[in-house]
Amino acid sequence: MNKFILIAGLCLTITSLACSSKLVCYVTSWSIYRQTLGRFTTSNIDPNLCTHLIFAFADMSNNQLVARNSDDEIYLNDLSLLREKNPHLPVLVAIGGAVFDNNKFISMASHPESRKTFIDSTIKFLREKNFNGINLDWEFPQSAHKDMFSILCQDLYKAFVAESTLNGLPRLLVTAAVTAYKPYIDNGYDVPFISIYLDFINVMTFDMHGVWDGVTGHHSPLYKRPENNGNSAFKNAEYAMTYWRDSGAPSAKLIMGFAAYGRTFTLSTSDNDFGAPISGAGQAGPYTKAPGFWAYYEVCNHLKTGTVMWSEEQKVPYGIKETQWVGYDDMMSIEYKVDFIKEKNFGGGFVWSLDLDDFNGAFCDLGKYPLVQHLHNLLIEPLSTTMTTCTTTCTTITPTTTPPPPPTPTPPPLPLPPTTTTVLPLLYLAISRCTPS
């Protein structure tokens, strides 16, 4: 058994090291429900922009991987058709997310029979739709479920190897989106073990600060500020990526997260620096309609008459307009982050999500997909400004149902680290990243 693990890990590591940088992009099905210029469909996707595409999110029913509704079925079919434009584009399906009922994961992963049901259904689902793999977004395994997650990763990988050998098809990929916050990493992941079986690991280096802190703060800083100590010292991309690596994950498998959105605050005083007091979340964006959250194109639109500041310590911008404060990424911060990725030999970057960038070029005066295209140019190679879009074979989705209102989940309590009195509430993560709007 130990020999198998060693050999498997060595092979996977060699494979990862042989690959060039990845640019993994998520697409969210609920973005079709946004209005006018905020509405995003598969016709807006350039199949040559990213090295991997991940659909968020599938669901689980009776321990089987399923689409959430009929609109998602159409969306999934259209994503498959994108590969006619780029046959080399791997398309994966994510399951989970911040509002997903983790009891489904726990129940499924607890028993060999239910895991097999899930894995068999996953293989069937992916092969029928001509997709390339699964992205596990279990947010976040608690200490009691650490072994369950490990065994799930192992069983998926072994089943995918067996299916590939039997059918003579390329092996399906096993990937995961994981927390960037040290206490959750320690509680939820056997890092050396899962790293053997995961083809790449998306580290969610965003949502590190938000309205739950009661003061302003950038949600996706590259580095910490000098006054950050205790658990605050963990909340930056440098620490998170380094900690995952030092915990046993190969650098080449670690993919750093980029947020195509900003976290917003409403200031309660004239103080507008980091750590300034707030009265609550920032105003909802006109298209995304989630308090405390703006898509990058909404940030551009808002700050055309605002003040843009730069944090030299954290290498990220933030903007102020009247009582509204927003931390986000721009071209310069992306360059610093990509330099960090290259310096540390990490595997690349991933973006949450394509529909939050200025995908139609209507707001930022920088062309289509300014953030993601800049990432592509820095991580992969200069990209032609001519978009290759799916205009003839994709179906235009007319939503068959009125989108449900954003849920207000009550996630299972997560264990508190000994030195902290609060943890990141998942509610605010859920509103922006995992709910129809």
Image: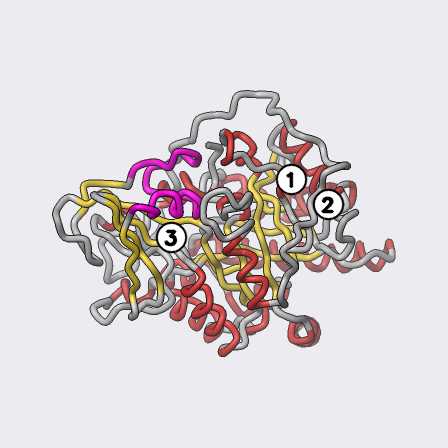
* Image spot of residue 292 (x, y percent): 32, 42
- The span from disc 3 to disc 1 (Cα, nearest Å) is 26 Å
Q: Name the residue rendered at 79%, 47% in the picture.
A: 84
The residue that mark 2 highlights is 82
Are the two marked residues, 3 and 1, in contact with CB atoms closer than 8 angstroms?
no
Q: Which comes before the other along the chain, label 2 or label 1?
A: 1
The residue that mark 1 highlights is 42
Vertical order, 109 against 223 (above or below): above
Vertical order, 369 against 405 (above or below): below
Vertical order, 433 against 165 (above or below): above
**Local secondary structure at mark 3:** loop
Q: Which comes before the other along the chain, label 3 or label 2?
A: 2
Give the quadrant of residue 167: bottom right
- On the rendered structure, is 191 left or right of 233? right
On residue 207, the disc is 3
Which contiguous range is marked in magenta? 283-305
Q: Is residue 286 magenta?
A: yes
The three-letter amino acid code for the residue at tag 3 is: Asp
